[in-house]
Amino acid sequence: MSKLNFSESMTVEFKSDEKKLSDDIIIDSVVAFANTSGGKLYLGVENDGRISGLHKDHKDITRLAAYIANKTVPPIAVSVEIVDGETDYLIISVRQSRSIVASSSGKILRRRLKANGEPENVPMYPHEINTRLSSLSLLDFSSLPVPESKYEDLSSVERERLRNIILAYDGEKNLLELSDEELDKALRLVTDHDGKLIPTYTGMLLIGQKDRIAALMPTVEMSFQVLQGTNVLLNDTFVMPLLAAFERIETYMSARNSEVEVECGLFRISVPDFDKRAFREAVVNAFCHRDYTMLGRVRIQLDESGLTISNPGGFIEGISVDNLLSAEPQGRNPALADAFKRIGLAERTGRGIDRIYEGSLIYGRPLPDYSDSNNIMVKLFIPRGLPDKAFVEMIATQQSKLGRATPVNMLLVLNALKQNRRMSVKELSEETHIAEARIKATTEALIEAGLIEASGTGKSRSYILSAKMYKQTDNTAGYVRQTGIDTVRYPELIMKYAKNNQGTITRYDVQQLLQVSAPQSYRLLRKLTVEGKLELVGKGKGAYYKVK
């Protein structure tokens, strides 16, 4: 009996069909796939991957596809194919749905992994429906009214804290001119329900009374931990309004975020262990993007290796570790995120992730790391590292010259070249997760600014840090190694090619051989002609050089 060379997973399910699998079970599997990440149902395959065969009633693939569409709400269009072989089996391919799907009998299912790693289809409960819709950007949970809450659950003390934050963090000053009720409406902290103002989840999260938050939103919890080896120096877990929690977290962090001074010419720059703006943005991101329907906490942990900030709720649909810097800004809780932006605590452009990366890049430190994130948790790790003095000075000088911050794309390219010395557009794109078209525009801007240099043409074109950059790092030898050796060897390579090509060589041959421009190839050949090593024969397109 034949056997498939892969096993079941979140996106693969095997079902035996020897005794004719129930159509209801097929529908359940299709619904579960659609409500999770999509996948393929292999009908006529045993759990261990052995192909046992397809029942005759399931060989009409047109009827089966129509049946699935009729038995799902909204109707799911699947792709069905029979794989012919020693024993036939069938593959039903299901795409991930952009809405919640149910069977016509009312069952809403999803996929999950059991403790032993095997997949299963389980019911999707009401709170999970909200989570799913939020991850698809179809539901703003933070804008919904909080059940059993009343306007008096909002705290006047916390509202005053909000006003002070607007002043301190350069929020929208016109908000300060509003009355309390007008302010609450403007920031969507309340919603009108049957003529009464009811707190939204945003309102309760930002300025709710502590005891009412604990009673009505038991998932709201935060912690700040400081570890030294295996010793716990601080472990504070608390439930309180987010603005108060933010101030407590900042106080904890400020006491432990030491600084060193770096000399840049006539100036001194204070360099903290962790960039303050990047830290603030990372904490606000954790607050804004966490899933408030899930138990868990926003956790900030500080240890010798670095800073970890994690929050319940994975990346929303369309966002992954690979496209964090290029994807369009999207949020799980738009109303909450909008309030944070308007009061000044979050990046107004929605590109807070740029600021988090910038906080490490401007000091020449290792990049922030999201690789430990999964479908139920986003985890950011910002490594510790000594600042790169030359890199700090170069960025400070560039920003002073431009009168503005250096774009994060430029910082990423400079950092990649600092680490890898020489890279092509394709290599830079793979390293930075930035599209090649944008990399080309960025490298040209950096060449114009005198920060990098290019050599070669076409696909062989590569980039290195400029002589100025190497000089700033007292590494002139490094620059020579990157550029000089090739240049010194050019005449040798030209003569070797000519001798092995019946004693002749053309300008085009040199361009292809050395990946240089036409003017460069002309200058190299002319120099060898003046030195008496080559002789020009003919003119125009037919001209070539021969060995003397």
Image (tube, rainbow, N blue to C red):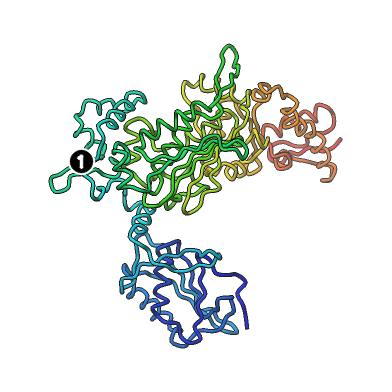
Looking at the picture, how far across and down is residue 370, in whole percent?
53, 44
Looking at the picture, how far across and down is residue 497, in whole percent?
81, 42
Tell how many labels: 1
Residue for point 33% across, 44% down = 214
Q: Which residue is mark 1?
A: 151
Check disc 1 and report its element: helix, strand or loop.
helix
Residue at the far left: name it: 195
Residue for point 56% across, 13% down = 267
Residue for point 80% across, 30% down = 529
Is 397 situated above or below 487? above
Looking at the picture, how far across and down is residue 94, in whole percent?
44, 68
Badge 1 crowding class, 10 Å Cα cut-off, few under 14, some 14 to 19, many 20 or more, is some
Task: Specify whether 492 is left or right of 189.
Answer: right
Is 449 situated above or below 443? above
Looking at the picture, how far across and down is residue 152, in whole percent?
21, 39
Q: Which quarter of the rendered picture does the N terminus lie within? A: bottom right
Residue at the far right: name it: 548
Is 22 situated above or below 106? below
Q: Which quarter of the rendered picture does the C terminus lie within? A: top right
Q: Nearer the viewer, residue 164 or 278?
A: 164
Q: Nearer the viewer, residue 259 or 538?
A: 259
Disc 1 residue type (three-letter): Tyr
